[in-house]
Image: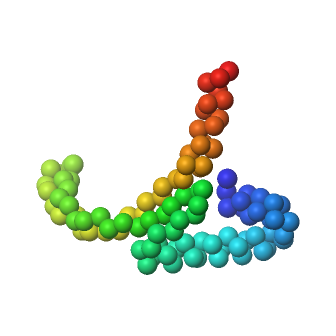
């Protein structure tokens, strides 16, 4: 699903103009980005959890030259799907097995 398709689906489901759906999506995106930048966890019940975790510096090897170097510490974004989302993804797989 593309961003445009998502905006259309939101406006259809909420019975609002696409302009309002686009504003809603932009606002949602801005809030998520702000929270991730501040390294806060965002939990959307029954959907997912978004967390930024600090990854410590580590020793890595350049595969071309074989030289070892120290990679700097950084933050990574981890998205964990909720049980309901996992179940929805696996439901179609379970239906195929029954046939």
Depth check: give the residue in front, 72 or 76.
76
- The colour scheme of the drawn protein is rainbow
Residue 8 visible in the current orientation = no
Tell me which residue sits at (65%, 23%) in the image.
98
Q: Where residue 47 sits in the image (x, y, percent)? A: 59, 56
Side of 63 where 80 appears, left or right: right
Q: Where residue 58 sits in the image (x, y, percent)? A: 20, 61
Side of 74 where 99 appears, left or right: right
Q: Is residue 84 above or below residue 41?
A: above
Q: Quadrant of residue 30?
A: bottom right
Tell me which residue sits at (66%, 29%) in the image.
95
Tell me which residue sits at (41%, 67%) in the image.
52
Question: What is the quadrant of the C terminus in the image?
Answer: top right
Depth check: give the residue in front, 41 or 77.
41
Side of 26 where 69 appears, left or right: left
Q: Quadrant of residue 88?
A: top right
């Amino acid at each position: 699903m593309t961003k445009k398709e998502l905006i259309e689906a939101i406006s259809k489901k909420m019975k609002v103009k696409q302009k309002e759906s686009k504003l809603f999506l932009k606002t949602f995106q801005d809030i998520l980005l702000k929270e991730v930048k501040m390294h806060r966890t965002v939990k959307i019940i029954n959907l997912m959890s978004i967390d930024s975790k600090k990854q410590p510096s580590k020793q890595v090897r350049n595969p071309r030259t074989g030289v070892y170097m120290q990679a700097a510490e950084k933050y990574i974004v981890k998205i964990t799907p909720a049980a309901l989302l996992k179940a929805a993804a696996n439901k179609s797989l379970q239906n195929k097995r029954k046939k």
